[in-house]
Amino acid sequence: MAQACIIAVFTEFLGALLLGSSTSETIKGGILSVERFVGQPELLMLGMLCALIGSAVWVISASKFGLPVSTTHSIVGAVIGVGIAAFGGEAIQWGYSGVAKIVTSWFVSPAIAGIVTSIIYLPTRFFILESPNSLERGIRAIPIYFFVTSAIGVFYIVYKGAPGTGASEMHAGVIVGISFGVATAVTAFSWVFFVKWLRRRVIGKENLRWYHIPLVYNIKHRPMPPQPDPTETSTTDAASTEASRELEIGTHPDGIEEKAVVSTKQCDDHNVSDSSNANESSSGEEQADSESRLLMIWKKIKYLALRGIRQDVRNIGNERLKNVHAAAKKFDDDTEYLFSFLQVVTACLASFSHGSNDVANAAGPIASIYDTWRSAKVDESGSSPVPVWILAMAGAAIDLGLVTYGYHVMRRLGNGVTYLSPSRGFAAELGASLTVLTASQVGLPVSTTHCITGAIAAIGLCNGNFRALNWKVLAWCTLSWILTLPIAGLTSGLLFAFGSNAPNNFIRG
C-alpha cells in the first residue's frame, strides 16, 4: 500500500502537470456561458469558488463511504448549479457542444473502456493463462507486453507535450518514431535481462531481488533460504514466552538471583543520591513532561499522516465477497506473478491519465478565478491557457487526498467488484488508461472513475459467470454517479445564491 501510494503521488502530479491543460480549458468555457458575466467579473469569481466548494464537499463526503464518485461529474454539476442560480437554465450550454457531449461520454466511456479491456484480457487468457505451459508462454510474451505498454505511454506524453516545450508541435511521424524507439529499447532490455531474471526467479526459485535485474548475468546462484519448520517455530516461541514469563514473576533461579542483586543495588543508590535528587527533581520532571508532550504530539501527527497508507484494502478473506471470488476462474500463481511487473507499469499509466484528466478538471474553476483577478475582466472565449502552477497545485492537492483518504475507495474497488489478479489488473488499468488518455487528447472530459469501473466490470464478465461480479457494489456506484450532478449542483447553487445576495455595504449612521 505504501509503495503504491508513493508511486501514485509522482504519477498523479506529473499527469496533471504535463497533460492537464486541454481538459481544464474545456471545463472552464464549455459548459457555462461566461459572456453573461461580462461587466461583473466578481460574480464569476464567486461562482467558481462556490463550484469548488460544492464539488469538494460532495467528493469528500462520498469518499468517506467508499463511493467512487467522479471529480469530473462534481465539477460539471457544480458549474451548472452556479449558472442556473445566477442566470437561469438558459445560461448553460445544454447542447452537444457543452453538457450533452459530456453526459454522452459518461455512458460511452465505461463501455469503451470495457471493450478495450476485454480485447486486451481475453487473448491473454486464452493463449497464455489457460495454456498447459502457461508459464513458458508468459515469459516469452512479457517483452511484447512491455513494448505495447511503453509505446502507448510515450506516444501520449510526447503527442500532448509538456507546457512550455515544442513537443506538441512535432509531426505525427516523428512522435511515432520516438515512441517505437523507446518501446524497442525497453523491449530489448526486458528480453535480455528481465526474461533471464524471471527464469531464475520464478522457475529456478532463486533468491533474487528487483535490483538484480541489470546484474543478472553476473550474479551467482542464490538459493532461497530454508523455510523454518512451523512445529519447531511454535515450540521455540512457546519456550521463549514461558522463559520470559518466569523471569518476570521471578520463578527462574537466575531471575531470583538477578532480582536480589538489583534490589540491593537500588537500595544503596537510593541512600547515596537522595539528597542530590531532591534539588533536581522539579526541573527534571518539568523537562520530562515537556518531552513527553512533544513526543505525544509527534506520534499523533505521524499517525494521522500515515494512517491512510497503512490500511488493508485488498478485501482478502471477506466473507461477503467469498462467493463472488469463488465464481472467478483462477490460474497458475507463477504465471500470474509475471504480470505483476506489467501491472506496476500500467498502474503508473492509469495514475498518470487520472492526473491528466480529473486533476485538470478541478483546476478549471481555479484558472477562471485567477484569470479574472489578474486581468480584472472576464475571458469571453474561455480558452485562456491554464497556468502551470495551478496544475501543479491541483496535483499536489490530489496527492494529499490520496495518501490520507483514498483508501476508502481503494477498498471498495480493490477486489470489491470482482476478483482481481495481476493479469486482470494489468488489462483493466491499460484499457482504462487508453480510454482516458485518448479523451484527454481530444479535450473530452471523461471520468476516470467511470472508465476504471467499466474496465473492472468487463474483467468480471470475461469470467463467463454473472456471479463473478458484485452487482450490489456496481449498483451503489451507479447510484452515486446519478446523485453527483444534482447534489454538487444544488450545493454550489445555494452557496452562490447566498453569497451573491448577501448585503455588501455597511449601514452608516
Image (spheres, rainbow, N blue to C red):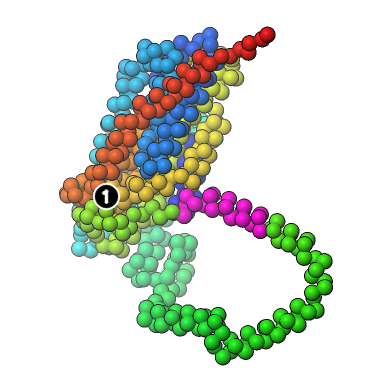
- Amino acid type at circle 1 is Thr
Would you say 505 lies left or right of 337 here? right
- Circle 1 residues within 10 Å: few <14, some 14–19, many ≥20: many
Magenta-colored stretch includes residue 309? yes
Would you say 268 lies left or right of 371 here? right
Would you say 131 lies left or right of 480 here? left
Which of the pair 223/395 is nearer the observer? Answer: 395
Residue depicted at x 29% and y 39%: 476
**Residue 308 drawn at (x, y percent):** 47, 50
**Residue 444 drawn at (x, y percent):** 37, 27
How many labels were placed on the picture? 1
Tell me, yes or no, if residue 181 can be seen here.
Answer: no
Q: Which quadrant would the C terminus be assigned to in this image?
A: top right
Magenta-colored stretch includes residue 48? no
The image quadrant that residue 221 belongs to is bottom left
Say if 42 sits above or below 449 in the image.
above
Residue depicted at x 42% and y 16%: 85
Q: Which residue is mark 1?
A: 418
Q: Residue furthest bottom?
A: 253
Magenta residue span: 292-310
Which of the pair 371/310 is nearer the observer? Answer: 310
Most frequent secondary structure within the magenta stretch: helix
Tell me, yes or no, if residue 375 can be seen here.
Answer: yes
Say if 83 sits above or below 440 in the image.
above
**Residue 68 drawn at (x, y percent):** 36, 40
